[in-house]
Amino acid sequence: MLKRQSLSKQFSYTFFLIILCTLLTLFIEIVIFSIYILHDTKLLPANHYEKIVPRIENTVNENKEKVLEVSFEEIMNKIVPKNGIKYIVLDNNGQYVYGNAEIDIFPNKDTLEQEWVKRLNTQHVSSNVVSKYIPIMDGNNKLVGECAIQYELKVSYKNKDKITKNILWGIILSPFIIVVVFTVIFGRKLSKNIKEPLGILTEAAEKIKNNNLDFHINYPYKNELGDAVTSFEDMRSELHKTLNKQWKLEDEKNLMISAISHDLRTPLTIIKGHAEMLNDGAYKKEDRLLKYLRSIENSSDWAVALLNDMNTLIKIENVDFKLNKEKVDIYKFIENKVKEYESLTNDKNIMIKVECWDEGNLEKEEIGKQVNNESVFSQEVDVQEVDVQEVDGVDKHIRKYGLRIKEDGVKGGILKDVMVDKLRVSQVIDNIITNSIRYTPDGGIITVRINAHHERLNIAIEDSGSGFSNEDLKMALEKFYRGDKSRGSGSGHSGLGLYISRKLINLHDGQLRIYNNKNGGAGVEFFIYQT
């Protein structure tokens, strides 16, 4: 079936079929014509006109000088076939008297006019054309003129049989006509084979133009047109996925804006209320003034944090977002980060410990689940106690252990310098530790454990708070989840911190998980591979 073939083969087969059908039709025509000829009694043999020549000679000899009379031409024309034999009658001076052909049908005019006597009673044959010269005698057997005749030795037919002649012309011209006919027939077939998939593509393009992507197209034949249809379907499918994803992102952005706007009402309402009370004279009492100013400051920080979370989320969910990785001394980096939280921890008398895991503690069972096609770990596990000696500074701690550090890192040893986006990792740690500070009771402990073995950076942050609930373990990494049923609870956070942290770690080709440690507190651990 032509549809199954490639376009080049379809064109080749179509051309071949046109030629083949033309030849077959021509062959059939020739066979039919041959059969017709074989049964046609009007077909004349090659020597047919040669048999008439004796009768012409007898007529000339019997009528003698009468043959030279112009009135005798009518009799001659009855005897001599017009289309089979040409003749002229000349007088004794070689002058033309009459005939059914012009004198220039003969080879040499001078010969006819001056030396015609020499050829009397002779016959000349050239390329199957016979020229014969019959003398015209009077009653005294005196030469008075000449009758020259010319005929061709070939198979022919009678002049009145026009049907045979037309058939021959038809056979000669028929190949051109047949080629045109079969070109039209097979051309239409080929055109139909091409128009079908093109029609499918045109219809699909029109649907896409009208913003309709909920359809499927298919062309069952594997050729260039089939490939084009398949590619178009793949494009439609990818476009549909992309647009759905874009629409989903738009919905999420709208939801996020709506949620943030809702959350901003609380701090702004507080700020507005306190400002109004200050305007009403509350500022005159110092204790009330300080209380309101502190509340306004906290609400402002709350509003700024909400807006920062929204801004960060918009950035990292943009398809053009890229990390700006650089070489970072991870131990010095963590040491400096811990110092940033002193003011927050001092208010609640919380101690932050920084520990370095040895290589053995890296072996932990990693059981995860998929959230939005990203690797997330969320299972309660026990973390082994690490026998460490608390000293001032991470570098001192490492030297106390006697661990070997190399600038570029060596597999099997400790990596001092890691390639990360310093700003984004800082955001992740800020989100985790601020959450830990929020939920850790006064006098509690927050532990930061670092492991940079085997070309993998591993940081775990645990607190001594109440830990995650079962629902938290399932939902805490989702967008806008805050562990409560009402957004207006005044919790002071947007529910985006852990979600943003997971997204940023995934962008580093890493993984993030949450769990409850053996003491019941919450733990957040992330891995970043150094490949």
Image: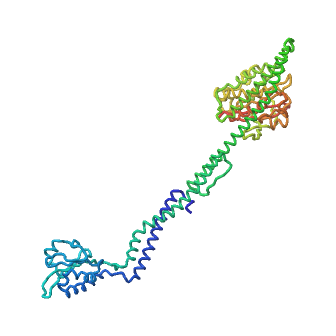
Q: Nearer the viewer, residue 240 or 328?
A: 240
Place residue 494 in its image quadrant.
top right
Camera-side residue of 170 and 420: 170
Residue 387 seen by the camera: no
Q: Quadrant of the rendered structure where residue 98 is?
A: bottom left
Give the vertical position of 455 relative to 106 (above or below). Answer: above
Q: Residue 217 placed where, x, y %?
A: 64, 53
Which quarter of the picture shows residue 172? Answer: bottom left
Q: In which quarter of the image is the C terminus?
A: top right
Would residue 477 be found to the left or right of residue 135 on screen? Answer: right
What colour scheme was applied to this rendering of the protein?
rainbow
Judged left or right of residue 15, residue 445 is right
- The residue nearer to you, when weighing 269 against 496, is 269
In the rendered image, which quarter contains the N terminus?
bottom right
Camera sees residue 20? yes
Q: In this view, does 289 lie above or below 487?
A: above
Most foreground residue, 178 or 485: 178
Q: Which residue is drawn at 20% across and 78% down?
A: 89
- On screen, residue 144 above or below 315: below
Residue 9 falls left or right of residue 437 = left
Q: In x, y percent, where is residue 151? A: 26, 78
